[in-house]
Amino acid sequence: MKLNLKQLNKIRDLTEEGMSLNQISNNVNVSKTTVYYHFKKIRGLTNIKPKFNFNDDTLLGEVVGIFTGDGSFYFEPKGYHYQIRVHFGIKNIKYLNKVKKLFDFSFGKSFSTKKDGDNKLILETHSKDISHFFFEYLNFNGLKIKHGVCSPRKRGIYHIYIFTRDNNRIKEILKPFKGR
């Protein structure tokens, strides 16, 4: 569908005002795909690909350990969204800020901070690549994780153990690896 000059100008103006694709599509009365075509010419790509920055195994072990202990993953098939979250108590704001800096640096992508109820905070991003990164190292097999511990066994080889809700048994869920 070819847009007239008035529609193109309206898309440009609404994009610069910060309106969402959905709002612009409804306002101009054209498909969301058409709006996105013009939107990305104005604002550029909105989905930033991660750039993995793991200088050493210690940093890699720390990131995987934090995610294993406090993280969660959710895939929403209808919208095709990969959601990665790390959960914190409201009193752990200093720790959340430290982890945010660590994750922002490690993945080259900004994680947002959200409040969840009265006493929880969440560090969150959406990325298929980051979720696949964690699945490269972790083997969940449908486990419900209660909490986790990361421990180096030998130099450069890390194993992550978790205490599960069934029998409080310790299970190894990290595939052993040597560096990247």
Image (cartoon, helix red, strand yellow):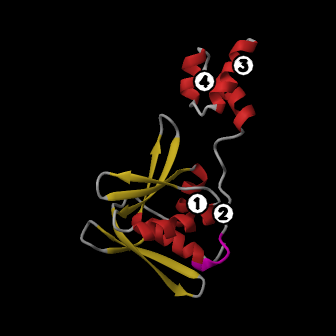
Residue 55 falls within the magenta-colored stretch: yes
Q: Is 159 placed above or below 75 here?
A: below
Residue at 62%, 26% in the rendered image:
14
In the picture of the structure, the residue carrying the numbered disc 3 is 8
Circle 4 sits in a helix, a strand or a loop, which is it?
A: helix
Q: Earlier in the sequence, mark 1 or mark 3?
A: 3
Residue 2 visible in the current orientation: no
Q: CA distance from mark 4 to mark 2?
A: 31 Å
Q: Earlier in the sequence, mark 2 or mark 3?
A: 3
Amino acid type, residue under disc 3 in the picture: Leu
Q: Earlier in the sequence, mark 1 or mark 4?
A: 4
Amino acid type, residue under disc 4 in the picture: Lys
For discs 1 and 3, the disc positioned in front in the rendered view: 3
Badge 1: residue crowd in 10 Å (few <14, some 14–19, many ≥20): some
Q: CA distance from mark 2 to mark 3?
A: 37 Å
Is disc 1 in contact with disc 2, using a CB cutoff of under 8 Å? Answer: yes
Q: Nearer the viewer, residue 6 or 52?
A: 6
